[in-house]
Amino acid sequence: MNDKYKIVIDPGHGGSDSGAVGNGIVEKDLTLKISKYMYDRFKELGIPVKITRDDDSTLDPNSRPKKVLEQFGNGRNVIVISNHINAGGGEGAEVIYALRNNSKLASMVLDELEKSGQIPRRFYQRRLPSDVSKDYYYIIRNTPNNETIIVEYGFLDNAKDAQKLKNNYKEYAEAVVKAVSNYAGYNYYLNSSNNLDDYYIVKAGDTLWSIAKRYNLTVDELKKLNKLTNNTLTIGSKLLINNNASNNDIEGQYIVKKGDTLYSIANKYGLTVDKLKSINNLSNNILSIGQSLKVSNDISNYPIYTVKKGDTLYSIAKKFNVAVDELKLLNNLVNNILSIDQNLIIPLK
Protein backbone atom coordinates (compact mmCIF):
# COMPACT_ATOMS: atom_id res chain seq x y z
CA MET A 1 0.00 0.00 0.00
CA ASN A 2 1.18 3.49 -0.79
CA ASP A 3 1.35 5.37 2.51
CA LYS A 4 2.86 8.54 1.11
CA TYR A 5 -0.28 10.62 0.84
CA LYS A 6 -2.72 11.44 3.60
CA ILE A 7 -6.14 13.05 3.14
CA VAL A 8 -7.89 15.84 5.05
CA ILE A 9 -11.54 16.43 4.15
CA ASP A 10 -12.98 19.86 4.90
CA PRO A 11 -16.79 20.22 4.76
CA GLY A 12 -17.33 23.85 3.80
CA HIS A 13 -19.14 26.24 6.15
CA GLY A 14 -21.03 24.89 9.20
CA GLY A 15 -22.73 26.08 12.37
CA SER A 16 -23.59 29.77 12.22
CA ASP A 17 -22.25 29.90 8.64
CA SER A 18 -24.84 28.20 6.45
CA GLY A 19 -23.11 28.97 3.17
CA ALA A 20 -25.34 29.29 0.11
CA VAL A 21 -29.02 28.34 0.36
CA GLY A 22 -31.50 27.60 -2.42
CA ASN A 23 -33.84 25.05 -4.01
CA GLY A 24 -34.12 23.06 -0.79
CA ILE A 25 -30.33 22.81 -0.30
CA VAL A 26 -28.29 24.33 2.51
CA GLU A 27 -24.62 24.28 1.57
CA LYS A 28 -23.24 23.43 5.03
CA ASP A 29 -25.54 20.38 5.29
CA LEU A 30 -24.81 18.96 1.85
CA THR A 31 -21.05 19.48 2.14
CA LEU A 32 -21.18 17.56 5.43
CA LYS A 33 -23.06 14.66 3.79
CA ILE A 34 -20.58 14.58 0.92
CA SER A 35 -17.62 14.76 3.28
CA LYS A 36 -18.87 12.02 5.61
CA TYR A 37 -19.42 9.73 2.63
CA MET A 38 -15.90 10.44 1.38
CA TYR A 39 -14.41 9.93 4.83
CA ASP A 40 -16.02 6.49 5.14
CA ARG A 41 -14.86 5.50 1.67
CA PHE A 42 -11.25 6.57 2.21
CA LYS A 43 -11.26 4.62 5.48
CA GLU A 44 -12.65 1.60 3.64
CA LEU A 45 -9.85 1.90 1.08
CA GLY A 46 -7.25 1.98 3.86
CA ILE A 47 -6.14 5.54 3.11
CA PRO A 48 -5.15 7.74 6.09
CA VAL A 49 -7.91 10.34 6.38
CA LYS A 50 -9.15 13.01 8.80
CA ILE A 51 -12.09 15.40 8.69
CA THR A 52 -12.24 18.97 10.00
CA ARG A 53 -15.82 18.68 11.24
CA ASP A 54 -18.27 15.79 11.53
CA ASP A 55 -21.19 17.82 12.87
CA ASP A 56 -22.81 21.23 12.46
CA SER A 57 -20.00 23.15 14.14
CA THR A 58 -18.65 26.56 13.18
CA LEU A 59 -15.12 26.94 11.80
CA ASP A 60 -14.11 30.53 11.11
CA PRO A 61 -11.43 31.57 8.57
CA ASN A 62 -8.75 31.45 11.29
CA SER A 63 -9.66 28.15 12.94
CA ARG A 64 -10.41 26.18 9.77
CA PRO A 65 -6.86 26.16 8.29
CA LYS A 66 -5.47 25.48 11.77
CA LYS A 67 -7.83 22.54 12.07
CA VAL A 68 -6.57 21.23 8.72
CA LEU A 69 -2.93 21.53 9.73
CA GLU A 70 -3.58 19.83 13.09
CA GLN A 71 -4.52 16.60 11.31
CA PHE A 72 -1.38 15.54 9.41
CA GLY A 73 0.75 18.68 9.49
CA ASN A 74 1.86 21.03 6.72
CA GLY A 75 3.66 18.56 4.49
CA ARG A 76 3.45 18.19 0.73
CA ASN A 77 2.18 14.64 1.23
CA VAL A 78 -1.20 15.92 2.50
CA ILE A 79 -4.10 16.35 0.09
CA VAL A 80 -6.81 18.69 1.40
CA ILE A 81 -10.27 18.43 -0.17
CA SER A 82 -12.47 21.40 0.71
CA ASN A 83 -16.04 20.61 -0.32
CA HIS A 84 -18.44 23.36 -1.41
CA ILE A 85 -21.65 23.98 -3.35
CA ASN A 86 -21.64 26.91 -5.74
CA ALA A 87 -24.13 29.72 -6.33
CA GLY A 88 -24.44 32.51 -8.87
CA GLY A 89 -26.53 31.08 -11.66
CA GLY A 90 -24.04 28.79 -13.39
CA GLU A 91 -24.24 25.05 -13.98
CA GLY A 92 -21.78 22.24 -13.38
CA ALA A 93 -18.70 21.46 -11.30
CA GLU A 94 -15.53 23.45 -10.75
CA VAL A 95 -12.22 22.62 -9.08
CA ILE A 96 -9.83 25.29 -7.77
CA TYR A 97 -6.20 24.39 -7.15
CA ALA A 98 -3.24 26.18 -5.56
CA LEU A 99 -0.74 28.42 -7.32
CA ARG A 100 2.00 26.21 -5.89
CA ASN A 101 0.63 23.05 -7.54
CA ASN A 102 0.11 21.85 -11.10
CA SER A 103 -3.31 21.07 -12.50
CA LYS A 104 -3.08 17.26 -12.58
CA LEU A 105 -5.17 16.48 -9.47
CA ALA A 106 -7.80 19.13 -10.26
CA SER A 107 -8.05 17.84 -13.84
CA MET A 108 -8.48 14.24 -12.67
CA VAL A 109 -11.20 15.24 -10.19
CA LEU A 110 -13.15 17.18 -12.81
CA ASP A 111 -12.77 14.34 -15.29
CA GLU A 112 -14.25 11.83 -12.83
CA LEU A 113 -17.08 14.22 -11.96
CA GLU A 114 -17.91 14.39 -15.67
CA LYS A 115 -17.93 10.59 -15.86
CA SER A 116 -20.34 10.54 -12.92
CA GLY A 117 -22.80 12.67 -14.89
CA GLN A 118 -22.04 16.23 -13.78
CA ILE A 119 -21.26 18.98 -16.28
CA PRO A 120 -17.56 20.00 -16.07
CA ARG A 121 -17.15 23.78 -16.05
CA ARG A 122 -13.46 24.37 -15.40
CA PHE A 123 -10.48 23.80 -13.15
CA TYR A 124 -8.52 26.92 -12.38
CA GLN A 125 -6.38 29.01 -10.02
CA ARG A 126 -7.38 32.35 -8.54
CA ARG A 127 -5.04 35.05 -7.26
CA LEU A 128 -5.52 37.50 -4.39
CA PRO A 129 -6.03 40.95 -5.99
CA SER A 130 -4.04 42.75 -3.30
CA ASP A 131 -1.07 40.37 -3.72
CA VAL A 132 -1.13 38.32 -6.93
CA SER A 133 1.62 36.06 -5.61
CA LYS A 134 -0.92 34.59 -3.15
CA ASP A 135 -3.99 32.42 -3.56
CA TYR A 136 -7.39 34.09 -3.33
CA TYR A 137 -9.04 31.49 -1.09
CA TYR A 138 -7.86 31.40 2.50
CA ILE A 139 -8.18 27.63 2.84
CA ILE A 140 -5.59 27.27 0.05
CA ARG A 141 -3.49 30.26 1.09
CA ASN A 142 -3.21 29.25 4.74
CA THR A 143 -2.34 25.60 4.15
CA PRO A 144 0.83 26.60 2.31
CA ASN A 145 2.51 23.25 1.64
CA ASN A 146 -0.49 20.96 1.42
CA GLU A 147 -1.95 20.07 -1.96
CA THR A 148 -5.28 21.78 -1.36
CA ILE A 149 -8.20 21.77 -3.77
CA ILE A 150 -11.67 23.28 -3.51
CA VAL A 151 -14.39 21.22 -5.17
CA GLU A 152 -17.60 23.02 -6.16
CA TYR A 153 -20.05 20.22 -7.00
CA GLY A 154 -22.71 22.32 -8.70
CA PHE A 155 -24.90 25.42 -8.42
CA LEU A 156 -27.70 25.15 -5.87
CA ASP A 157 -29.48 28.21 -7.30
CA ASN A 158 -29.79 26.42 -10.65
CA ALA A 159 -32.85 24.17 -10.51
CA LYS A 160 -31.34 21.48 -12.75
CA ASP A 161 -28.10 21.38 -10.80
CA ALA A 162 -29.93 21.41 -7.48
CA GLN A 163 -31.95 18.35 -8.45
CA LYS A 164 -28.82 16.53 -9.60
CA LEU A 165 -27.05 17.42 -6.35
CA LYS A 166 -29.93 16.01 -4.31
CA ASN A 167 -30.12 12.81 -6.35
CA ASN A 168 -26.48 12.15 -7.13
CA TYR A 169 -24.30 13.66 -4.41
CA LYS A 170 -22.96 10.22 -3.43
CA GLU A 171 -21.95 9.53 -7.03
CA TYR A 172 -20.15 12.89 -7.16
CA ALA A 173 -18.41 12.20 -3.86
CA GLU A 174 -17.37 8.76 -5.12
CA ALA A 175 -15.95 10.39 -8.25
CA VAL A 176 -13.65 12.55 -6.12
CA VAL A 177 -12.65 9.55 -3.99
CA LYS A 178 -11.70 7.67 -7.16
CA ALA A 179 -9.71 10.56 -8.63
CA VAL A 180 -7.80 11.29 -5.41
CA SER A 181 -7.10 7.59 -4.75
CA ASN A 182 -5.69 7.09 -8.23
CA TYR A 183 -3.68 10.31 -8.07
CA ALA A 184 -2.19 9.32 -4.73
CA GLY A 185 -1.26 5.84 -5.97
CA TYR A 186 -3.71 3.83 -3.86
CA ASN A 187 -5.64 0.79 -5.01
CA TYR A 188 -9.15 2.05 -5.70
CA TYR A 189 -12.08 -0.35 -5.75
CA LEU A 190 -15.84 -0.25 -5.33
CA ASN A 191 -17.23 -2.81 -2.92
CA SER A 192 -20.42 -4.73 -3.64
CA SER A 193 -21.87 -2.95 -0.60
CA ASN A 194 -21.70 0.26 -2.62
CA ASN A 195 -24.74 -0.01 -4.87
CA LEU A 196 -23.46 2.66 -7.26
CA ASP A 197 -22.77 -0.17 -9.73
CA ASP A 198 -26.53 -0.76 -9.89
CA TYR A 199 -27.12 2.68 -11.43
CA TYR A 200 -26.07 4.62 -14.49
CA ILE A 201 -25.86 8.42 -14.63
CA VAL A 202 -27.15 9.78 -17.93
CA LYS A 203 -24.58 11.75 -19.93
CA ALA A 204 -24.76 13.98 -22.99
CA GLY A 205 -25.41 11.90 -26.11
CA ASP A 206 -26.91 8.94 -24.27
CA THR A 207 -30.05 7.23 -25.57
CA LEU A 208 -32.14 4.48 -24.03
CA TRP A 209 -30.86 2.20 -26.80
CA SER A 210 -27.17 2.94 -26.12
CA ILE A 211 -27.56 2.48 -22.35
CA ALA A 212 -29.61 -0.71 -22.75
CA LYS A 213 -27.02 -2.14 -25.15
CA ARG A 214 -24.17 -1.32 -22.76
CA TYR A 215 -25.80 -3.26 -19.93
CA ASN A 216 -27.18 -6.13 -22.03
CA LEU A 217 -30.80 -5.05 -21.59
CA THR A 218 -33.58 -4.38 -24.05
CA VAL A 219 -35.00 -0.86 -24.22
CA ASP A 220 -38.30 -2.19 -22.90
CA GLU A 221 -36.54 -3.82 -19.93
CA LEU A 222 -34.72 -0.59 -19.15
CA LYS A 223 -37.92 1.43 -19.36
CA LYS A 224 -39.83 -1.06 -17.21
CA LEU A 225 -37.03 -1.15 -14.65
CA ASN A 226 -37.21 2.63 -14.30
CA LYS A 227 -40.96 3.08 -14.88
CA LEU A 228 -40.32 5.28 -17.92
CA THR A 229 -43.34 6.15 -20.06
CA ASN A 230 -41.37 7.72 -22.91
CA ASN A 231 -37.85 7.79 -24.36
CA THR A 232 -36.84 11.18 -22.97
CA LEU A 233 -33.68 11.26 -20.83
CA THR A 234 -32.27 14.05 -18.68
CA ILE A 235 -28.52 14.53 -18.35
CA GLY A 236 -27.51 13.74 -14.77
CA SER A 237 -30.54 11.56 -14.00
CA LYS A 238 -29.99 8.17 -12.39
CA LEU A 239 -31.16 4.97 -14.09
CA LEU A 240 -31.36 1.56 -12.45
CA ILE A 241 -29.52 -0.88 -14.73
CA ASN A 242 -29.22 -4.00 -12.58
CA ASN A 243 -32.16 -6.40 -12.69
CA ASN A 244 -31.00 -7.95 -9.43
CA ALA A 245 -30.65 -4.66 -7.60
CA SER A 246 -33.05 -3.54 -4.92
CA ASN A 247 -35.74 -1.36 -6.46
CA ASN A 248 -36.52 0.53 -3.27
CA ASP A 249 -36.36 3.95 -4.90
CA ILE A 250 -38.54 2.90 -7.84
CA GLU A 251 -41.24 0.91 -6.11
CA GLY A 252 -41.48 3.06 -2.98
CA GLN A 253 -40.45 0.09 -0.87
CA TYR A 254 -37.53 -0.43 1.49
CA ILE A 255 -36.20 -3.83 2.58
CA VAL A 256 -35.02 -3.73 6.19
CA LYS A 257 -31.33 -4.54 6.64
CA LYS A 258 -29.19 -5.33 9.66
CA GLY A 259 -28.71 -2.23 11.81
CA ASP A 260 -31.75 -0.37 10.47
CA THR A 261 -34.07 1.49 12.83
CA LEU A 262 -37.36 3.25 12.19
CA TYR A 263 -35.56 6.54 12.75
CA SER A 264 -32.76 5.82 10.24
CA ILE A 265 -35.22 4.68 7.57
CA ALA A 266 -37.62 7.58 8.16
CA ASN A 267 -34.74 10.06 7.96
CA LYS A 268 -33.48 8.48 4.71
CA TYR A 269 -36.83 9.03 2.99
CA GLY A 270 -37.81 12.40 4.50
CA LEU A 271 -40.46 10.99 6.81
CA THR A 272 -41.13 11.19 10.50
CA VAL A 273 -41.13 7.97 12.51
CA ASP A 274 -44.86 8.42 13.20
CA LYS A 275 -45.58 8.85 9.48
CA LEU A 276 -43.51 5.76 8.61
CA LYS A 277 -45.38 3.72 11.23
CA SER A 278 -48.71 5.08 10.05
CA ILE A 279 -48.31 4.18 6.35
CA ASN A 280 -47.11 0.70 7.36
CA ASN A 281 -49.72 0.12 10.09
CA LEU A 282 -46.98 -0.54 12.66
CA SER A 283 -48.00 -0.60 16.31
CA ASN A 284 -44.46 -0.79 17.73
CA ASN A 285 -40.85 -0.02 16.80
CA ILE A 286 -39.74 -3.61 16.18
CA LEU A 287 -38.28 -4.38 12.74
CA SER A 288 -37.25 -7.66 11.14
CA ILE A 289 -34.42 -8.09 8.65
CA GLY A 290 -35.98 -8.61 5.21
CA GLN A 291 -39.21 -6.84 6.17
CA SER A 292 -40.68 -4.67 3.38
CA LEU A 293 -41.72 -1.14 4.33
CA LYS A 294 -43.62 1.43 2.30
CA VAL A 295 -41.50 4.58 2.13
CA SER A 296 -43.30 6.57 -0.55
CA ASN A 297 -44.31 10.04 0.62
CA ASP A 298 -46.26 11.42 -2.33
CA ILE A 299 -46.78 15.11 -1.53
CA SER A 300 -48.52 16.06 -4.78
CA ASN A 301 -51.90 16.24 -3.05
CA TYR A 302 -50.71 17.90 0.14
CA PRO A 303 -52.22 21.30 0.98
CA ILE A 304 -50.11 24.42 0.59
CA TYR A 305 -50.11 27.27 3.10
CA THR A 306 -48.79 30.74 2.24
CA VAL A 307 -47.01 32.43 5.13
CA LYS A 308 -48.59 35.66 6.34
CA LYS A 309 -47.34 38.48 8.53
CA GLY A 310 -47.14 37.32 12.16
CA ASP A 311 -46.98 33.61 11.33
CA THR A 312 -44.51 31.33 13.10
CA LEU A 313 -43.78 27.66 12.58
CA TYR A 314 -45.45 26.99 15.91
CA SER A 315 -48.64 28.88 15.02
CA ILE A 316 -48.88 27.19 11.61
CA ALA A 317 -48.21 23.74 13.07
CA LYS A 318 -50.87 24.36 15.72
CA LYS A 319 -53.34 25.61 13.10
CA PHE A 320 -53.06 22.37 11.14
CA ASN A 321 -52.57 20.10 14.16
CA VAL A 322 -49.14 18.86 13.07
CA ALA A 323 -45.74 18.77 14.77
CA VAL A 324 -43.25 21.58 14.13
CA ASP A 325 -40.50 19.03 13.41
CA GLU A 326 -42.69 17.30 10.83
CA LEU A 327 -43.45 20.64 9.16
CA LYS A 328 -39.73 21.49 9.02
CA LEU A 329 -38.75 18.06 7.70
CA LEU A 330 -41.30 18.07 4.88
CA ASN A 331 -40.24 21.57 3.77
CA ASN A 332 -36.47 21.04 4.14
CA LEU A 333 -36.26 23.82 6.73
CA VAL A 334 -33.06 23.98 8.75
CA ASN A 335 -34.18 26.79 11.07
CA ASN A 336 -37.38 28.48 12.24
CA ILE A 337 -37.13 31.54 9.99
CA LEU A 338 -40.11 32.18 7.70
CA SER A 339 -40.70 34.74 4.94
CA ILE A 340 -43.99 36.41 4.09
CA ASP A 341 -45.56 34.75 1.00
CA GLN A 342 -43.38 31.65 1.46
CA ASN A 343 -45.28 28.49 0.51
CA LEU A 344 -45.25 25.61 3.00
CA ILE A 345 -46.37 22.05 2.33
CA ILE A 346 -48.69 20.92 5.13
CA PRO A 347 -48.35 17.27 6.24
CA LEU A 348 -51.44 15.13 5.92
CA LYS A 349 -52.67 13.46 9.08
Image (tube, grey):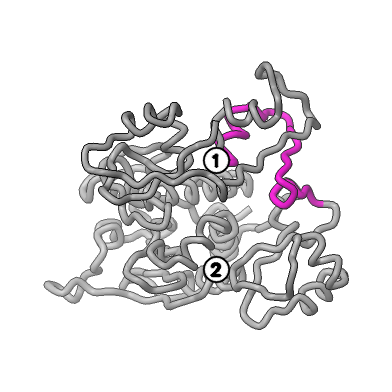
User: What is the magenta range?
Assistant: 245-269
Q: Along the horizontal axis of the image, is 172 left or right of 28? A: right
Q: Where does the C terminus fall, quadrant-wise?
A: top right
Residue at 37% of width from left, 27% of height from top?
A: 318
Expressed as whole percent of the image width and height from the top left, the position of residue 47 reads 56, 49
Q: Residue furthest top?
A: 284
Residue 147 is at least partly visible in this image:
no
Front-most of residues 187 and 292: 292
The part of the image, by quadrant, that contains residue 229 is bottom right
Structural crowding at the residue carrying mark 1, measured as other residues with C-alpha within 10 Å and reported as few (<14), some (14–19) or many (≥20): some
Instruction: Give SS at disc 1.
Output: loop
Front-most of residues 2 and 146: 146
**Label 2 vs 1, first from the N-terminus:** 2
Determine if the magenta segment contains residue 259: yes
* Amino acid type indicated by mark 1: Gly
Residue at 37% of width from left, 41% of height from top?
A: 334
Expressed as whole percent of the image width and height from the top left, the position of residue 312 reads 28, 35
Q: Which residue is mark 2?
A: 113
Structural crowding at the residue carrying mark 2, measured as other residues with C-alpha within 10 Å and reported as few (<14), some (14–19) or many (≥20): many
Instruction: Give SS at disc 2.
Output: helix
Q: Along the horizontal axis of the image, is 55 left or right of 347? A: left
Disc number lying in front (2 or 1): 1
- Asked if 241 appears above or below 272 in the picture, the reply is below
Residue at 77% of width from left, 34% of height from top?
A: 292
Q: Residue furthest left?
A: 130
Residue at 72% of width from left, 23% of height from top?
A: 287
Total tally of numbered discs in the picture: 2
Expressed as whole percent of the image width and height from the top left, the position of residue 228 reads 74, 65
Q: Which residue is mark 1?
A: 270
